[in-house]
Image (cartoon, rainbow, N blue to C red):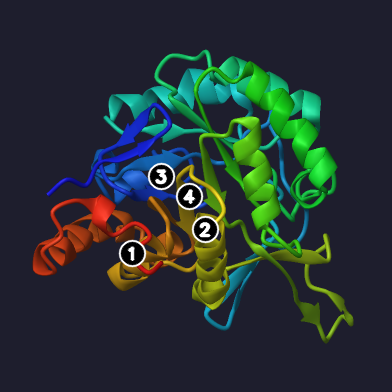
């Protein structure tokens, strides 16, 4: 069976990846799985300088999911390149840094430096985080700002560029189409949905940032619909995510049009889930007589 997936100039050994923000920098997940066995690790969102993230409550469970307001806490670019990236590379895994700058200029600089860094073949531009007050979701919900950001980042990015979209818009397909027109190599869909929790004892929002990002199985039907719609509008690969925790979910996303998938919240329930899904997908393909992963992609259209 051929499980290789091509995204721009990058070839993944299989379509199972770990979603940014849920697997740290690979080292955390490596205590539970062989990270070289999965397609790629999308690392925690990076800024130029270290970021402490949001104050106060950061995460809470909801029915079939979680709300998080981490605020893109990360070690910063220098520590990532000098300390975090070498571990991933030594482990034989594919690292795809997630770019999460506060401003257009910061995103440009991050992409410029990282795309020229050895052993980095792709970057994921995060235009969709709902948990930071500067930049974040604004990049992914205003088409004019989105266009300016992606154009400027594309100009300096020498490797594969993946754009991670926000579901918190009326028509997400126009953002996917625009990204393709500008020259993005792939789309990640989707980031978390906007949600909220009220502390009824304190009579105020549970999160200091008021809103938070909803993820987990609760959002899968929405994410699946979005991937299906984007696949009909663009020719570049789509990386699907949102509530995946079993092989049937992976197959649904791929039949909807995803070339690869990212496992997010499920990593916090079962840290070994990604490697397990690689095996489960291979067994599914064998059982259903699929010779190549390409036969699954868009099969429901």
Residue 102 seen from this side: no
Cβ atoms under marks 3 and 1 closer than 8 Å: no
Describe the element under mark 4 as helix, strand or loop. strand
Mark seen at residue 232: 2
Residue assigned mark 4:
238
Residue assigned mark 3:
28
Q: Residues within 10 Å of mark 2 (few under 14, many from 20)?
A: few
Give percent across and percent down for residue 179: 64, 40
Nearer to us of marks 3 and 4 is 4
Cβ atoms under marks 1 and 4 closer than 8 Å: no
Q: Tell me which residue sits at (81%, 32%) in the image.
A: 103
Q: Tell me which residue sits at (24%, 60%) in the image.
A: 276
Describe the element under mark 1 as helix, strand or loop. loop
* Residue in the foreground of this view, choosing between 146 and 128: 146
Cβ atoms under marks 3 and 4 closer than 8 Å: no
| Label whose residue precedes the other's in the sequence (3 or 1) | 3
| Label whose residue precedes the other's in the sequence (3 or 4) | 3
| Label whose residue precedes the other's in the sequence (2 or 4) | 2
């Amino acid at each position: 069976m051929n499980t290789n997936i091509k995204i721009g100039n990058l070839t993944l050994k299989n379509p199972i990846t770990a979603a940014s923000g849920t697997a740290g920098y690979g080292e955390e997940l490596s205590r539970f799985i062989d990270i070289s066995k999965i397609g790629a690790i999308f690392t925690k969102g990076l800024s130029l300088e270290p970021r402490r993230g949001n104050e106060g409550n950061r995460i809470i469970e909801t029915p079939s999911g979680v709300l998080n307001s981490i605020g893109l806490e990360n070690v910063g670019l220098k520590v990532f390149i000098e300390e975090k990236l070498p571990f991933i590379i030594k482990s034989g895994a594919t690292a795809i840094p997630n770019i999460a700058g506060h401003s257009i200029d910061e995103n440009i600089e991050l992409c410029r430096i990282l795309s020229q860094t050895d052993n980095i073949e792709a970057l994921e531009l995060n235009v969709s985080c709902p948990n930071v007050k500067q930049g974040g979701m604004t990049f992914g919900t205003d088409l004019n700002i989105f266009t300016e950001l992606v154009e400027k980042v594309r100009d300096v990015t020498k490797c594969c560029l993946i754009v991670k979209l926000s579901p918190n818009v009326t028509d997400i397909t126009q953002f996917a189409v625009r990204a393709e027109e500008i020259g993005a190599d792939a789309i990640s869909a989707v980031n978390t949905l906007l949600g909220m929790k009220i502390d009824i004892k304190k009579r105020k929002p549970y999160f200091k940032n008021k809103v938070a990002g909803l993820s987990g199985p609760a959002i899968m039907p929405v994410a699946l619909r979005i991937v299906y719609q984007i696949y009909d509008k663009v020719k570049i690969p789509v990386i699907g995510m949102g509530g995946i925790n079993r092989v049937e979910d992976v197959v649904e996303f791929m039949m909807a049009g995803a070339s690869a998938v990212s496992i997010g919240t499920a990593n916090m329930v079962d840290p070994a889930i990604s490697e397990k899904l690689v095996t489960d997908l291979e067994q599914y393909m064998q059982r259903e007589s699929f010779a190549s992963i390409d036969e699954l992609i868009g099969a429901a259209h």
